[in-house]
Image: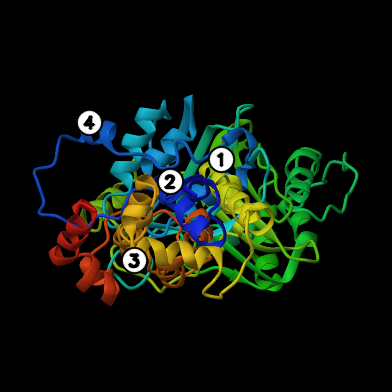
Amino acid sequence: REGALRVGLCGQTRMLILSAASSTFALHSAAGPRPRLPVAPRASPPAAVQTLVEPSPFTTLLPSRTLTCSTLLRRLFVEPETSFSPAAVAAACSEDVEWVDMDLTEPIRGREAVERHLRAKWPLGSLLKVERLSDGASSGGFTWHREADGVSGSGLRGVTYFELNGEGELAYVQEGSEPLFKLDTILEAFLTAANANRQDEAKPPRSYERQTPTTASGIARYLWEVAYPGGATPSEALSFFSDEVVYEDFNYREPFVGLQAVSAYISLLDAFPQFTFLPERISDGDTGVCITWRCEVNGEPGPSGISYNQVDKSGKICFARDIPAPSIKPPPLAAVAARLSPQLRTFQPRAPLPSVAPPPPTALDTLAARPARAAIALAWFSFSAYVALASPGEFSVSADSFDNQLIAKAIDDPTSLNPIFFAVFNALGVLPGINAALLLPGAKGQRPLPAAPFVSAAFFLGFGAAGPYLALRQPRPDPVGRSELGFFARYVTESRLYGGGLLAAGGRPP
């Protein structure tokens, strides 16, 4: 009889006992650190120490060799619910990464230097909002703007180019942000005067063959590597723009909207045949492409910059952003704005701008990105299959069923049971309570599964109910404010009375 008690458990009872061993493991391996409530502030360590001690949740979550550039950028800059993590970005870089900030005179090299640079440029309360993200595999980029916690509106805008090495690490990055002083009407007047005074010269014969690519990178490579070197003027690009194109040249305060406005502007550039455009890097991407470039004027070094183009479903450029590198580095106005408004880096907030919304992760995405979650899901499926297909006895709700008889005996005469089984069986009333205290503070906005139904059902079904939620829940490593807690978490599971009750129930001898 005692042997039957050791090995003959089935149905829901067996699932409950299995949860005693597996639920605790699953909670700590899958749920990530428990969300912490804010505590009284302490003196901050020096910046150098902070760089070393901040945990980087992405260090182990990014299998960089298997990720495309666009996926890596999405995880680093789009999916975080608040701001990106400088430590996570640095961890995704190669040891000899070269990070070019067009506002600085020298590139930044090495992971630690990149992390220090990002911390200084994006202080606490700064938000980087990605607007458009290219779909490149080995290289890519995005357009972005700054926002600030508690401030309505947007700040400085920019473009960043990224390139991976053979190991899937960020090996080269170039970022550019808009100049606060814009030539605008001055530049327009200069271009207009140059066109009025130009003398028509015989143009050299075209030495390239016209092509009609329809992908973002294909168009960029044709224009920059074939057409322009072959004698094409900037007007060659007009055939690739859509009728509703939005073209942001950050020498101007307002964008050019529509093909007619863009045509009028680009045609002014034809007055400078001695102006040669030279590409430096062109990213991958069918729908979006990032380009770093420079110019030569009469064979001498001229302006440089960074651009982003996006094509629509018909293969026409529907959006373009050009950012010239500043002639004075760092730009004086940018330095003043950074002191007055470190988060936005503009003198006043602008109108709000749209950004890329992080898509809700699918179950497959969650399991593939976090091996511990896959192990939990496999354990849950294995336990469920065993209970349904291989456990002894039959599923029945009658009072004479083996499970109900066993539960009745555990309640009526505990001393007749195997003491190990008795201890585990009674612990199953405590473990779900502990799990509730650990899981509910991070329950707000959980995707793809809500917390409450699974945490509640765990009191009756143990790991059988909690398993799917533990496998798919989103980690909550950042502190959670008391105001963000739900009613039950705030007034019950976070109370001292609840903790004392769990301690008493867990420590009470049989």
447 and 269: which one is in front? 447
From the image, tell me which residue sits under label 2: 21
- Mark 1 / mark 4, whichever is N-terminal: 4
Mark 4 crowdedness (10 Å alpha carbons): few <14, some 14-19, many ≥20: few
Q: Amino acid at mark 4?
A: Ala
Query: Looking at the rendered structure, which numbered label has been put on residue 48?
Result: 4
Disc 3 is placed on an element classified as helix
Query: Looking at the rendered structure, which numbered label has been put on residue 162?
Result: 1
Q: Nearer the viewer, mark 2 or mark 3?
A: 3
> Disc 3 and disc 4: Cα gap in Å?
63 Å
Q: Can residue 267 be seen in the rendering of this structure?
A: yes
In this rendering, the answer to whether 243 lies above or below 267 is below
- Mark 4 / mark 2, whichever is N-terminal: 2
The answer to whether the residues at label 1 and label 4 have Cβ atoms under 8 Å apart is no
Mark 1 crowdedness (10 Å alpha carbons): few <14, some 14-19, many ≥20: many
212 sits left or right of 182 in the view: right
Q: Amino acid at mark 1?
A: Phe
Q: Amino acid at mark 3?
A: Asp
Residue 440 image-quadrant placement: bottom left
